[in-house]
Image (spheres, rainbow, N blue to C red):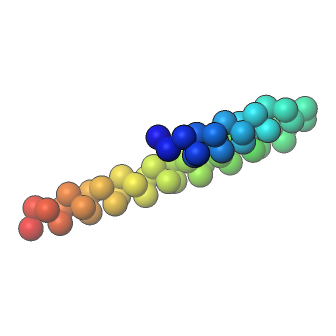
Amino acid sequence: MDNNFKQKIDALVSEVAAINNLTIKVDILNYMEQQAAFMLWQLSDEMHIDEDSHNI
């Protein structure tokens, strides 16, 4: 993993961890989880398209 991205992610996680309001923290983490899942789904779809293009 690119160290620059890792540092940005770690900084964001630290910022979220510092939030005192648990409801807001849960909302933020749920949103982050949804976005990550969507990105993983997109990547999986792109990988399948790429694999299919090699099989032609």
Q: Count of labels shown?
A: 0
Q: Is residue 49 above or below residue 3?
A: below
Residue 14 sits in which quadrant? top right
Q: Quadrant of residue 33?
A: top right
Where is residue 19? Give x, y as percent.
86, 35
The answer to which of 31 and 9 lies nearer the viewer is 9
Give the left or right position of residue 34, taking residue 44 as reference: right
Q: Is residue 33 visible?
A: no
Across and down, in percent, residue 24 comes to 84, 41
Question: Seen from this angle, which residue lies furthest left?
Answer: 56
Q: Note whether residue 8 is visible.
A: yes
* Left or right of residue 1: residue 17: right
Q: Is residue 4 shown above or below 48?
A: above
Q: Nearer the viewer, residue 9 or 26?
A: 9
Q: Residue furthest front?
A: 3
* Residue at 85% in and 32% down: 18
Whole-percent x, y for residue 1 in the image: 47, 40
